[in-house]
Amino acid sequence: MSPRLVGAMLAWELRRAGRAFMRHGGRFGIVLVLAALLGVAASIVGQRQADAAQQAQARLAERLAQRASAPVLPPAGGALDGRARLKAFDDYLPLHDDIPTVVQDLLNQAEDQHLVLARGDYRAQPDLQGGFMRYRMSLPVKGDAPAVLKLMQVALQSHKTLALESVQFKRARIESADVEVRLQWVLLTRLPEPVR
């Protein structure tokens, strides 16, 4: 059989199957088939976005692990004793009064990435034994997933004593490009100066 004849037979079979489908399913059948196709397409798009989010989380975890393994204090000639290390750690921490500046910087960076900010939760936890303060921030943002990743990267690079404790992604609909993300940050600072 020639390719032209095979093509004609295939076209005739497709038309015959289409007419049979229209007799049995009608317009409602077409709507169901289109809905099924849209569902499959939405599922594929959602899976790709989920894969992209997982890859972004893996890259972020890798960068955080690299950052955590990097020595904070370079060794100076020999091993530092405990008091010198503690003093170096204390000197490395920003002042307690710098907390509002860091928070405002995070909010500005989120706006620069065109993310919508919701009301956050802030909690100070002094570590009297360690001699420093943990300032915990929970910032909900909404926007494009790559913009959220960029915010996390820029914030961590800008503030050396800022750490990302957890990230929770949520998408309202599978086909939605926007995600809702809850970013849990912790900022290490010095303890507040005693009031005199």
Image (tube, grey):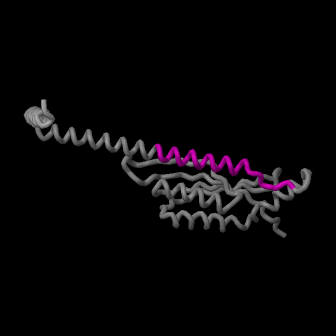
Image quadrant assignment for residue 27: top left
Residue 21 visible? The answer is: no
Q: Quadrant of the N terminus?
A: top left
Image quadrant assignment for residue 121: bottom right
Q: Which residues are magenta?
A: 51-75
- The answer to whether residue 151 is magenta is no
Direction from residue 131 to residue 171 in the image, left or right? left
Q: Quadrant of the C terminus?
A: bottom right
Q: In the rendered view, would you say 191 is above or below 184?
A: below
Residue at 45% in and 44% down:
50
Q: In the rendered view, would you say 156 is above or below 52?
A: below
Direction from residue 33 to residue 65 in the image, left or right? right
Q: Nearer the viewer, residue 182 or 69?
A: 69
Residue 158 visible? The answer is: yes
Task: Count numbered badges in the picture.
Answer: 0
Q: Nearer the viewer, residue 77 or 22?
A: 77
Look at the magenta stretch and give its main secondary structure.
helix
Residue 124 at x, y = what percent? Answer: 69, 56
Residue at 40% in and 53% down:
177
Direction from residue 95 to residue 82 in the image, left or right? right
